[in-house]
Image (spheres, rainbow, N blue to C red):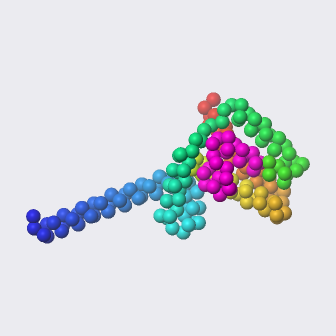
Amino acid sequence: MDISTAIILALVVIIIVGAVAWIMMQRRTQELRKRFGPEYDRVINERGDARQAESELAARQKRVDRLDIHPLDLAEREQFIEAWRATQARFVDAPAEAIKDADRLVTEVMQARGYPVGDFEQRAADVSVDHPIMVENYRAARAIALANERGESGTEDLRQAIVHYRALFEDLLETREREVAQ
């Protein structure tokens, strides 16, 4: 084989390897975008670099895959549902306290399911893997709860926070899947 044939062959191999790598990167992007939904865009906007954001999302997924996330048993689920009803009823007379209860209940459900419950950002990152749509609710509710602690939120804000917490709470309890299955 002469040198020009070897060079052409090497270039063809480089082009093929490059094309395969590009296709794999596109597939990874599509899979992450599908899995994380709006969270994918939020992380990209926050990081400002798609490759960095995708690495972070992939790391989240690996972290959560190593955890023992499991559904609640029926008794636990019923206890949490009753606690939520009490929190929701409390909202009428004491909305600020009900928001604190709602945040605590969501954290307790996460812990009971097997999620680590360290700082808020880690909880949100972990829950984004399995509940990518609901994590937006979690962040919105948390922002309102923090504003409430500073005396910067009104009753309508608190109502919106309880709605956000309830959506995540129900998703964590997996009530929708069970209702559909029945």
Q: Residue at x 53, y 46 (%)?
A: 65
Instruction: Name the outermost residue toward the right.
Output: 93
Q: Is residue 37 magenta?
A: no
Q: Residue at x 37, y 61 (%)?
A: 22
Q: Is residue 113 magenta?
A: yes
Residue 149 lies, in percent from the top left, at 81, 60
**Prevalent SS, magenta region:** helix
Residue 137 in view (yes/no):
no
Q: Is residue 40 above or below residue 2?
A: above
Residue 26 in view (yes/no):
yes
How many marks do you count on the picture?
Answer: 0
Q: 18 or 62, which is in the foreground?
A: 62
Q: Residue at x 87, y 48 (%)?
A: 92
Residue 131 lies, in percent from the top left, at 61, 48
| Quarter of the rendering containing residue 17 | bottom left
Image quarter (top left, top right, bottom left or bottom right) of the C terminus: top right
Residue 100 lies, in percent from the top left, at 80, 51
Residue 38 lies, in percent from the top left, at 58, 57
Q: Residue at x 65, y 52 (%)?
A: 123
Left or right for 37, reference 143: left
Q: 159 or 109, which is in the foreground?
A: 109
Image quarter (top left, top right, bottom left or bottom right) of the N terminus: bottom left
| Span highlighted in magenta in the image | 102-127
Left or right for 47, reference 169: left
Q: Is residue 45 above or below residue 176?
A: below
Instruction: Name the outermost residue toward the top.
Output: 182
